[in-house]
Amino acid sequence: MPEVSNRGKIMPASPIRKLVPLANKAKAKGVKVYHLNIGQPDLPTPPEALEAIRNIDRKILEYSPSEGLLSYRQKLVQYYAKFNIDVTADDIIITTGGSEAVTFTFLSCLDPGDEIIVPEPSYANYTAFAIVSGAIIKTVPSHIEDGFALPPIEKFEALITPRTKGIMICNPNNPTGYLYTREELNSIRDLVKKYDLFLFSDEVYREFCYTGAPYISAFHLEGIQDNVVLFDSVSKRYSECGTRTGMLVTKNATVKQNVMKFCQARLSPPLIGQIAGEASLNASDDYVLSCYNQYVERRKFLVDGLNRIAGVYCPIPMGAFYCVAKLPVDDADKFCAWMLDEFEFEGKTVFMAPMSGFYTTPGIGVNEVRIAYVLNKEDLGVALKVLQEGLKAYPGRVLE
Amino acid sequence: MPEVSNRGKIMPASPIRKLVPLANKAKAKGVKVYHLNIGQPDLPTPPEALEAIRNIDRKILEYSPSEGLLSYRQKLVQYYAKFNIDVTADDIIITTGGSEAVTFTFLSCLDPGDEIIVPEPSYANYTAFAIVSGAIIKTVPSHIEDGFALPPIEKFEALITPRTKGIMICNPNNPTGYLYTREELNSIRDLVKKYDLFLFSDEVYREFCYTGAPYISAFHLEGIQDNVVLFDSVSKRYSECGTRTGMLVTKNATVKQNVMKFCQARLSPPLIGQIAGEASLNASDDYVLSCYNQYVERRKFLVDGLNRIAGVYCPIPMGAFYCVAKLPVDDADKFCAWMLDEFEFEGKTVFMAPMSGFYTTPGIGVNEVRIAYVLNKEDLGVALKVLQEGLKAYPGRVLE
């Protein structure tokens, strides 16, 4: 048999994915598994999106333009304007999910051996997309004790080499729920300016900021407009992950031109997803507010509940719908596997994401898990109880 | 401004894409443009697919599994069985269009500097997907005078180096419409076996074979089952290009495992496209036959018409819905641009694809165009007349 690629071999298998067979095994035994491991919201897709799909009156489901439907991009201009992000339809390229937006941007901006700096913990698949482009991710650790605030900018600067091409952030952050302050973002801006770097900014959770602190987009930072590539997606905002509708926004003409070559090679983003995405922009204020309110309530309920469990510490997240909790266990990978494989409480167990997949620095976050609050309060209550009982029974429990 | 990637710079912009602004300019002047340049069929999507979309009764458009919906993959097993392709649901991975199937396979099998051999002319975007993986495409020219038959296998063997990892074919062929014979495919099989190469086989046009000669899949070749990766797509078969539903089929466990890592990183293929694709498998025999019959009729009408124009030569294609024609012109790129930019006949012109984008060997096919017969006979008749008049008027006409 011919040898497969080295690139394929080094692609990390996600620690979450490794646990899926155990979750399936638990389900096969009749155990109810509470999924707190993935960012698949349980909230409904806007009825406007579903109606638009049901009312499609086309006879042919044809290619859309490679850059996406013009009508959709025009409507997105107004959407962004509501957040004081001043862009034109030409600055927006529709992609197959946010994943493709990141992949095509990395392919367009980064050559093999080029480096980008990312505060960790960070979204695990950035690493995968970097591997596709051959680029190297260098990480600056943030810490649960600081609520995952941006590490001092000097730590970023210390990693800069002649191969450094950019900084990547996710704001509000997946997995930490942290929302970067103006001061933190200004320090990033200064570094971006000083070394003429790209600023790749994943802002898919902008609707979900809970503390009254402002959401600050990379496009709100002065003097670096041509350095910014913003990544976006309708998946979380409208609970329509399966439509695979993402986008990138940039004013950098050369980046746009390069990205368009990759877009043209794959011909078209999904047509129906764009129709759903465009219709979702008509979602009522009630829909948006109702989603927001549910996350606010769940967040408080979950984080309070976690911090009430002996030995658990969870900083309150300011945005997104994840929190990272430190557990009194030897190893969160082992604990999460054990919860699925060996534990049940009244026929129930909990699937959480070990944080090992979100860090690259060895030894950090070994006792941390990410919990997505994508279940209703009642289910979260049960999950908290199951977690509490699991921690009591776990043989690898660490007493502080 | 930071520098973009070299990879982005070397990505070729398709010669077809370069003509799009000229086509738009012609339309703005009120000229009717007949699009023979792209493989976007004008035939209707099966009503079963449209109905399935209209009847979606989900409240949440959630992620599908990264490998695609199990029910769809199971039904595809029966579909392939009809073509004597004996695979299981585990051998099938659903992708975002055929494009993603090729990209993920190249990423999984090929490292930067690895080589694959492709008979040319070939689908232009293979080059783009190879650039994504860093692999190098080496081409063996086939010729219009031979009806684009497979070049002698010795020419392939002469290109083999220690970096050669595979051979890629498209059968029935885009752009030539050629259908490879058992003898030709056996010669490829022997080479694949001798050097233990991958055989990447794009077979999206299998329904469209017109001469009674058998369609032979790469999976029909004996002794190389673990070397084969088959690419497929619903786009052309069911006229639903916009759903972005493709797939790859392989029995090679290591390739599957690698491809799945890339699939998991991008989370999910489009959900609604899969629902449409699955429903399309229920399309009636009448639908399938009607599409087939229309292509048969158009093909004869178009190719007869082309060969009746003075100086034009077009071998009759055996499959797919393209033909390649040699025109009495100095340069097909210039001629196609001129047709859009400067010519019109009774307010009409024709958009064809210059073949330069399908060849990499310099100097071959400079007077060839690809014509997709994706319009009805009446429109094809008008397009033929316009082409005939255009050739008469073109200043770069070459008299033989």
Image (cartoon, coloured by chain):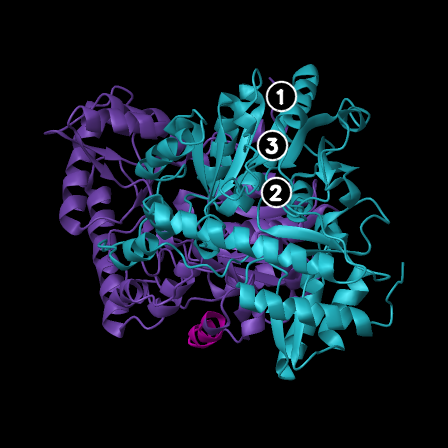
Chain colours: A purple, B cyan
**Front residue of this view, candidates A244 and B391:** B391
Letter of the chain that mark 2 sits on in the rendering: B
Q: Nearer the viewer, residue A290 or A317?
A: A290
Residue A221 visible to the viewer: no
Left/right of residue B70 with respect to residue B183 in the rendered view: left
* Measured Cα–Cα span from mark 2 to mark 1: 35 Å
Q: What kind of residue is marked 1?
A: Glu
Q: Is residue A141 above or below residue B199?
A: below
Relative to B100, residue B185 above or below: above
Kindly state the secondary structure of the residue where label 2 is placed. loop
**Are there few (<14), some (14-19), or many (20+) residues within 10 Å of tag 1?**
some
Q: In the current view of this chain or complex, which residue is farthest to the bottom?
A: B29
| Tag 3: amino acid | Phe
Instruction: Give A226 or B86, whichever is nearer the viewer.
Output: B86
Query: Depth-wise, is mark 1 or mark 3 nearer the camera?
Result: 3
Q: Secondary structure at mark 1?
A: loop
- Whether callout 3 and callout 2 share a subunit is answered yes
Q: Label 3 belongs to which residue? A: B200
Name the residue located 38 percent from the left edge and 47 percent from the top edge.
B277
Q: Which residue is mark 2?
A: B318
Discs 2/1, front? 2
Name the residue nearer the viewer: B377 or A339: B377
Q: Which residues are magenta?
A: A72-83
What residue is rendered at 25% in x and 59% in y? A296
Residue A176 x, y percent position in the rendering: 39, 48
Chain letter of the residue beneath label 1 in the structure image: A
